[in-house]
Amino acid sequence: MSWKRILVCAAFAAPYVFSLSSVANARTSILNASYDVSRELYKDINPAFVAAWKAKTGETITVNQSHGGSSKQALSIIAGLEADVVTMNQASDIDALVERGGYVAADWRTRFPYDATPYTTTTVFLVRKGNPKGIRDWNDLVRPGVGVILPNPKISGNGRYTYLAAWGYALKKSKTEGAAREFVARLFANVPVVDGGGRGATTTFTQRDVGDVLVTFENEAVAIGVELGADKFDVVYPRFSVKAAAPVALVDKVVDKRGTRRLATAYLQFLFSPQGQEIIARHAFRPRNKTVLQKFAGRFPAIKTFSVERMLGGWASVQAKHFAEGAIYDQIVVNR
């Protein structure tokens, strides 16, 4: 699907919106456009920030929430969605807002700590209880008869990280890009359906009972166990996976138009506060604050990870090489 067609679809999409209040004016309400599997996180973050802001300023504010595939959310903003802040799962989607109309300032990474990423996560496997297919690592996903469920890498950051985690594993093992490409092609040959986002993939696996393994972010896999019961699924950690840092940014065009820069900035700063970091950790995202991370260390098994920037040359290179129109991913899908 071309970027132009995706943009048209995004313009007519009706994003899921969670509102803490139906009454607000422009200066005391903000909209956070976020990715698909962060819904539960922000359902806790938002009221905590509202209460903290009330205690500090005496003002009653509203935080609204929009969720969808990360890249689709960026395109929705370009198409007219007036989000004050974006909380994405990959930098390329925020960079798209810089490049396509200057919605976000080019220096967005320097405005908040840790390159404006309040937490990280990684890609893991969710299997059915007892792991009947014996899935332990990436090489098990390319075996004949194994059904793999994952989101669409063209419009979902979750899916893009899955693709890159598999590529990075194969590249580390084989040392050649040809072998990595062959491995990823074999993996996608085992994908019966490609969902539009992480939450759609979860529904396909857990409610429609399609597939043998769901490849998704660690926080989503843990949340499924809590929500649906530990007696139904097991989480499997591969030996090597991708480190996914979740970036945040002000949408400068919107906050200047609506007069919400002060409020929106405070909202993103709250994510890096000890209170915000604890909420993040409770939702199985890996917090940046070392004290908070140590407090919740038991939730986060050790796993060797690589970053897109260090191993694969950065998001601009990855986007052009793998996910642009006609690039490697398109070639793999056409030929699968």
Image (spheres, rainbow, N blue to C red):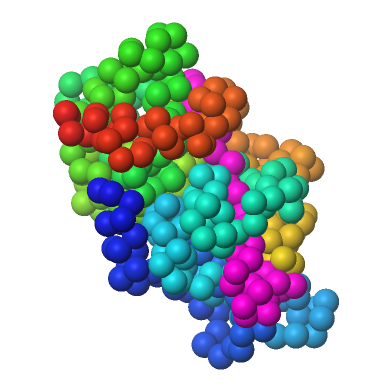
Q: Is residue 148 above or below residue 262?
A: above
Magenta segment range?
239-264
Q: Position of residue 73 (x, y in %)?
A: 44, 60
* Residue in the foreground of this view, choosing between 194 and 26: 26
Name the residue: 56% across, 90% down: 23
**Residue 254 image-quadrant placement:** bottom right
Q: Position of residue 50 (x, y in %)?
A: 68, 75
Name the residue: 62% across, 54% down: 248
Q: Position of residue 285 (x, y in %)?
A: 58, 46
Name the residue: 70% across, 72% down: 261
* Residue in the foreground of this view, choosing between 308 and 144: 308
**Left or right side of 276 for 96:** left
Magenta run includes residue 210 = no
* Residue in the foreground of this view, choosing between 211 and 18: 18
Q: Which corner quadrant holds the C terminus?
A: top left
Q: Is residue 128 above or below residue 58?
A: above
**Left or right side of 62 for 172:** left
> Is residue 243 something one can see in this rendering?
yes
